[in-house]
Image (cartoon, rainbow, N blue to C red):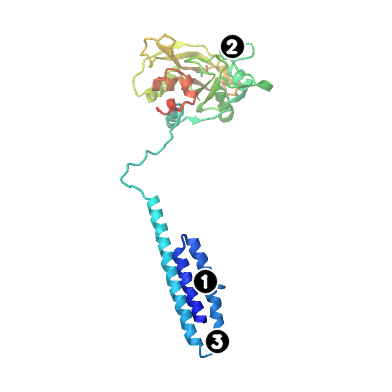
Amino acid sequence: MLADSIRELESGSLARIRAARTLEELEAVRVEVLGRKGTLTLAQKEIGKLAPADRPAFGQILNGAKRDLEAEFDRRKSEFDQAATGARLKGEWLDLTLPAPPPRRGHLHPITRIQRELEELFRSLGFAVLDGPEVEDEYHNFDALNIPAEHPARDMQDTFWLEGGHLLRTHTSPVQVRGMERLGPPLRMIAPGRVFRNESVDASHEHTFYQLEGMMIDRDVSVAHLLYFMKTLLTAIFHREVTVRLRPGYFPFVEPGFELDIQCLICGGTGCAVCKQSGWVELLPCGLVNPNVLRMSAIDPEEWNGFAFGLGLTRLAMMRYGIDDIRHLQGGDLRFLEQF
Ligand code: PHE
């Protein structure tokens, strides 16, 4: 009687194990039948109630049922496992013979590249690379460079004035002053950085652009030293002969002052928007440091003198890469930037 019910339980459970459609369903059947409180497990406990003589036969049936069910359960489970592994393999299959997608790699902005090259060059020549604030005070941007208030030279550099007498630096020359103050003579320094002018923007003018300032102070520095460094600089930048011309130039902080122009590399000197049809581009204003400037930074001009230059990094990048509109450089258009 009891044996019949066990056989019934076995065949019913086997059918359910076979009918399970998922691993979860299968597991549910297992718990229900073979689990700690499963029907078969509970039936096992009934043995004690039987007459001792009946126990072995019943036990055999029970064990047989358990074995069969467990075997069938294991068989189904491995079926599910295999199916899952198969599905995963199919999903994760990779064709290793396919060409790999090109790695997405960023690169430096053309101005950053030129800046770093020049930093390296000047370091090798014994120059320190200095940094200075973009928000400057009037003293460092103007007064200490021999440009007092009311001086007409202030009008050459349309200034973004800020509150409290501060301003956005109009050139990197204030870093000369900070360098002299901090390090004193002898001094070899460059200072690359962003400068700002309140100008209307066109193909060759931006309100924000980059300069690289340079200064050397020592004993007996002459125009010959200045020219040597300027030539070294230009050769390193362009890797080729460029035609240059030197004109007298006026900057209150140098005396004598020069404008070093290069023949326009965009149009080859025939005239274009970048060189304003002149064939020449102002690239490198420079000169010997005005004694007043030294004096204001507590350097004795009887003992020391030097040269200074202010390279237009933005213009330089345009010349080197043949960029005909300054607005591209800060425009943030990736189609432009990705070309470099
Ligand atoms: N600071 C000047 C400018 O931006 C350039 C300059 C620097 C000229 C150093 C001479 C010497 O216009």
x and y percent of residue 122 in the render?
Answer: 44, 29
Against 283, residue 47 (above or below) is: below
Q: Residue at x 36, y 9 (%)?
A: 270
Q: Please, what is the three-letter code of the amino acid marked with disc 2?
A: Asp
CA gap, disc 3 and disc 1 = 21 Å
Is residue 312 visible in the rendered structure shown here?
A: no
- The earlier-in-sequence mark between 1 and 2 is 1
Q: Please, what is the three-letter code of the amino acid marked with disc 1?
A: Val
Return the residue at label 2: 155
- The earlier-in-sequence mark between 3 and 2 is 3
Return the residue at label 3: 50
Q: Find numbered disc 3 in the image and state the secondary structure of the residue it sits on.
A: loop
Disc 1 versus disc 2: nearer the observer? 1
Q: Find numbered disc 2 in the image and state the secondary structure of the residue it sits on.
A: helix
CA gap, disc 3 and disc 2 = 115 Å
Residue 18: quadrant of the picture: bottom left
Return the residue at label 1: 33
